[in-house]
Image (cartoon, rainbow, N blue to C red):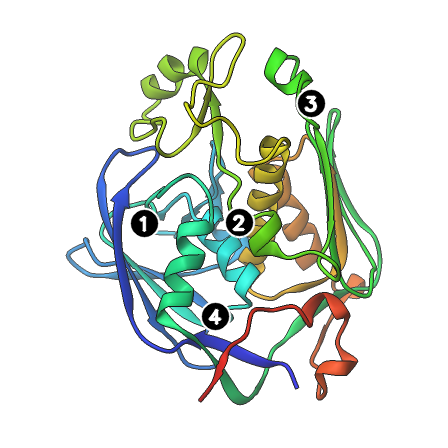
């Protein structure tokens, strides 16, 4: 059987917000079955909880940000959500002392380390709920597009397009079928990236205030400025795939589907989830009484402990 998962114990870390530049304390706590992924702003006079929900993603400028009707924000959640997806975390409370999660090294790998350090437990007898895509779903904007197609597993394919010397030297398409390849090995370490020429504009809009060479790949007119270079030859497009996995997991359940896209970003990824929610005939909830009955993409979830 494939059961729901949460943490074994509480774990805490600190870091800097990529866009705010604030110092942030992040605490991850176990949560009950069927409670989902809940973010809690502990810096507010009255701590406020926001559940991961595609309809609350109301700011997609360079990140995915939840905003509730009262205007409380929880931003830059996509890397942490991607780590939750990669480890199959269903239920967790995320406490934050600021309006965004810490950027850490710009990838999901530090969050994977935190989650594995806390320990992951199966919440028997509650079965994990999957969303199986039954009909194709498609969203486009100009030459950008994303889609979900029926597929007995989970595979992702993404392409990017930048007219820049660094990108012309790097593959701009990546495809991963998680039946054969590991999220931790192939995706988690890919870092976010940005261009030097965009820094001033970003900061004038209150964005990127905490960005530096320790938490992002920085590119000038010709080269990558990070001394150690890239972690993968195609790290740029792998990071976009990391973002997409995190954005899709805001729906709160793993997808049994094939995701593909071209030049997609947080806004388009969120639009795809909203189309999914508004098209009930295109999907269904499923559980698996036997792990052998589940698609092989989900047989590779990292080992967990049992309660």
Against 143, residue 95 (above or below) is below
User: Mark 2, residues whose alpha carbon is within 10 Å: few (<14), some, or many (≥20)?
Assistant: many
The residue under the point 72% across, 87% down is 290
Q: Position of residue 84 (x, y in %)?
A: 50, 61
User: Residue 93 falls in which quadrant of the image?
Assistant: bottom left
Whether tag 1 and tag 3 are in contact, CB under 8 A, the answer is: no
Q: Nearer the viewer, residue 3 or 301?
A: 301
Residue nearest the observer in this picture, 111 or 93: 111
Label 4, on which residue? Answer: 36
Q: Earlier in the sequence, mark 1 or mark 3?
A: 1
Residue indicated by mark 1: 72
Residue at the image point whose x is 33% and y is 17% from the top: 204
Q: Secondary structure at mark 2?
A: loop
Which class describes the residues within 10 Å of circle 4: few (<14), some (14-19), or many (20+)? many
The label number, if any, that marks residue 161 in the structure image: 3
Most extreme residue toward the bottom is: 125
Q: Are marks 3 and 4 in contact (CB under 8 Å)?
A: no
Q: Is residue 183 above or below residue 92?
A: above
Q: Which residue is mark 2?
A: 188
């Amino acid at each position: 059987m494939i059961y729901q998962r949460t943490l074994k114990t509480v774990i805490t870390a600190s870091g800097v917000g990529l866009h705010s530049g604030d110092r942030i304390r992040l605490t991850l706590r176990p949560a009950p079955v069927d409670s989902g992924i809940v973010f809690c702003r502990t810096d507010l006079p009255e701590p406020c909880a926001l559940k991961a929900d595609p309809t609350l993603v109301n700011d997609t400028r360079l990140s995915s940000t939840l905003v509730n009707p009262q205007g409380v924000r929880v931003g830059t959640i996509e890397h942490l959500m991607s780590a939750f997806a990669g480890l199959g975390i269903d239920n967790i409370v995320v406490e934050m002392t600021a309006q965004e999660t810490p950027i850490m090294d710009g990838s999901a790998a530090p969050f994977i380390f935190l989650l594995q350090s806390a320990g992951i437990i199966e919440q028997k007898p509650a079965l994990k709920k999957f969303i199986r895509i039954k009909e194709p779903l498609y969203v486009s904007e100009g030459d950008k597009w994303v889609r979900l197609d029926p597929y007995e597993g989970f595979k992702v394919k993404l392409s990017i397009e930048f007219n820049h010397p660094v990108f012309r030297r790097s593959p701009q398409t990546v495809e991963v079928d998680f039946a054969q390849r590991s999220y931790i090995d192939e995706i988690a370490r890919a870092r976010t990236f940005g261009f030097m020429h965009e820094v001033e504009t970003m900061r004038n809009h209150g964005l990127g205030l905490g960005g530096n060479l320790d938490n992002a790949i920085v590119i000038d007119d010709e080269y990558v400025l990070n001394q150690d270079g890239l972690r993968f030859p195609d790290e740029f497009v792998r990071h976009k795939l990391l973002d997409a996995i995190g954005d899709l997991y805001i729906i709160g359940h793993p997808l049994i589907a094939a995701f593909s896209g071209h030049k997609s970003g947080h806004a388009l990824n969120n639009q795809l989830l909203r189309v999914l929610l508004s098209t009930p005939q295109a999907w269904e909830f499923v559980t698996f009484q036997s792990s052998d009955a589940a698609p092989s993409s989900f047989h590779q979830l990292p080992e967990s402990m049992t309660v």
